[in-house]
Image: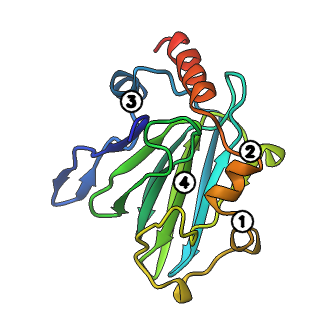
Amino acid sequence: MPHAYEISPILRGDDRGVFLESYRADLLAEATGRAFLLRQGNISVSKHGVARGIHYAEVNEPPTGQAKYFTVVVGSVVDFVVDIRVGSPTFGTWDSVELDDQNRKAVFLSEGLGHLFVVTSETVTVSYLTNDVYRPDREHGLSPLAADIGLDLPLPSSELILSAQDAAAPTLTAAREAGLLPTWDASLATYAAAAALGF
């Protein structure tokens, strides 16, 4: 999917354990063609079956929105990225990847993309870095159970644990009709503004 990246770090192990570079600004910029200026770091701890998302931030005129660099510290999740940018050639499509404390993969998703993870281990600790601080007035969500997205979730919907806000979130179609979704053009302008910052 355009503007979403799976990062597979080099794991260097010996009899002491494993070392890896969990984040490299220069290599990320080389791969994405843009700067990712870190402004907030978050840690989330969740139990089995928790589904957090689909979340996204508004993208209007650049530079707005919130790009994320997401990885698992302990445990495992299935991580989903959903293209919700109206006008995108891949609008409405999604991709997923298993992230855990063995493969140590990360996901970088650009502004305008929706994000969800579902916990598949007993508990999980995740870390995500963002290029903007949390702005609750600009944060939105979509239902992870919406048929118009059709996610292939790793657990039955009856086993998922959602926040009240996520359970009440609109479908993709309803959010589009209400004008709540980011646009492809505004997202591209934001990526160009990030690229212009240099790296």
Q: Find the distance from the CA under tag 4 to the CA under tag 2.
A: 15 Å
Q: In this view, does 158 lie above or below 121?
A: below
Q: Is residue 116 above or below residue 40?
A: below
Could you tell me which residue is drawn at 60 percent across and 23 percent down? 190
Residue type indicated by callout 3: Leu
Which residue is under mark 4?
Answer: 115
Which residue is under mark 1?
Answer: 169
Q: Find the distance from the CA under tag 3 to the CA under tag 1.
A: 32 Å
Q: Find the distance from the CA under tag 1 to the CA under tag 4.
A: 13 Å
Picture disc at residue 134 = 2
Residue type indicated by callout 4: His
Which residue is under mark 3?
Answer: 28
Left or right for 122, reference 50: left
Nearer the observer: mark 3 or 1; the answer is: 1
Residue type indicated by callout 1: Ala
Task: Determine whether the residue tagged by mark 3 lies in a helix, strand or loop.
Answer: helix
Could you tell me which residue is drawn at 39 percent across and 32 percent down? 24
Please provide percent x and percent y for residue 92: 50, 51
